[in-house]
Image: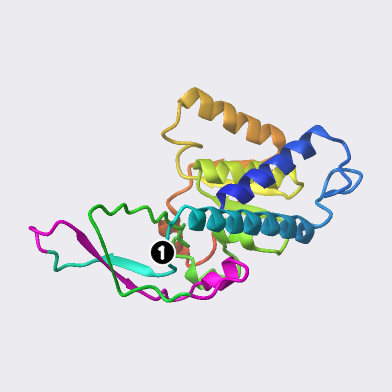
Amino acid sequence: CGCVPKKLLHGLAATKDSMADGAVAWDASGAVVRSWERIHGAIRDHVRAIAWSTSVELEAAGVETFVARARLSPKRDPSASSHEVLLSPPASAASPAARRPNASPRAPPALLKAAHVVVATGTRPSYAGFDDFSALVTTSDDFFVSGKPPGSALILGGGYIAVELSGILCSLGYPTSILVRSRVLRGFDVECADLVEEDLRRRGVRVHVGLPPISEINRVTRCVPTVDDASG
C-alpha cells in the first residue's frame, strides 16, 4: 500500500529541501505545505494508473486475478500431486471492476488446485492497543490514503518506515516527534543508525529514546502517551 506513495512523498520532500520556493506544493517561505489535498490527489491518481497498467500486463500474460480470501485445504491427501486452495469472498474489498476500467466483476471459483503454492500476502501495521483512540491514531498504511493534512505528528516506533515518515513530514513543514523504545533503526548498522538519528535531530525532528513499550503505557494509563521536554 505504501511503497509507491512513500517514494513520491520522499521525492517531494527532497525537492522541498533543495529549493527555497516550490510553488506547486508549499508557500513562498517553504514552511508549510500549501495543499495536502492536491498532493494526495496526485499520488492517488498515480497509484491508480500503476494498478491499471499492472492489471493489463497480467491479463496480457495470461495471469488470472481474483479478489478473494484464500486458505489451504486441511484435508489434503499426502499422496496427491497438487494442493487445494479454498477461496471465499473477502469481508470488504473493491470489486475488480473498480480497479480495471470496462472490466466485469468476476466471482472467484470455490476451489483452485496447484502443484506449488506461494504465500506472499504482505501484512498491515496494527493499532498496538489504541483501538479506543481511532480518531487520534492512524497507521502508516492509512496515512498514505488519507486526504486529511497530517498536522503535527507523533510517530511510534523507530523502524525504517517510522524514520522515513518522520523525515518526510518534517521536511514538508509539519512538527514531528518520534518515540523510540531503545534506539532508532535497531538491528541496522549502529554507526549508520546514529548518523540517521543525528540528521533527524538536525532537521528538527524531536527524537525521544527510552520510552516503555506502547502496550505497557496503554495498560497503565489508558490514554494516548504524551511527551514533555524542554521544547514543550
x and y percentages locating residue 93 in the rendered image:
50, 72
Q: Is residue 192 left or right of residue 202?
A: left
Quadrant location of residue 141? Answer: bottom right
Which residue is at a point 74% across and 56% down the rendered structure image? 42
Quadrant location of residue 70? Answer: bottom left
Question: Which three-letter amino acid code belongs to the residue tagged 1?
Answer: Arg
Residue, disc 1? 219
Which residues lie in the magenta part?
Answer: 77-105
Q: How many marks?
A: 1
Looking at the rendered image, the quarter that the N terminus falls into is bottom right
x and y percentages locating residue 124 in the rendered image:
45, 58
Magenta span includes 122: no
Which residue is at a point 48% across and 47% down the rendered structure image? 211
Q: Indicate how the structure is coloured in the image.
A: rainbow
Which residue is at a point 48% across and 42% down the rendered structure image? 210
Mark yes or no: residue 180 visible: yes
- Of residues 204 and 4, the one drawn nearer to the viewer in this rendering: 4
Mark yes or no: residue 231 visible: no
Which residue is at a point 51% across and 43% down the rendered structure image? 158
Magenta span includes 79: yes
- Of residues 65 and 59, the one drawn nearer to the viewer in this rendering: 59
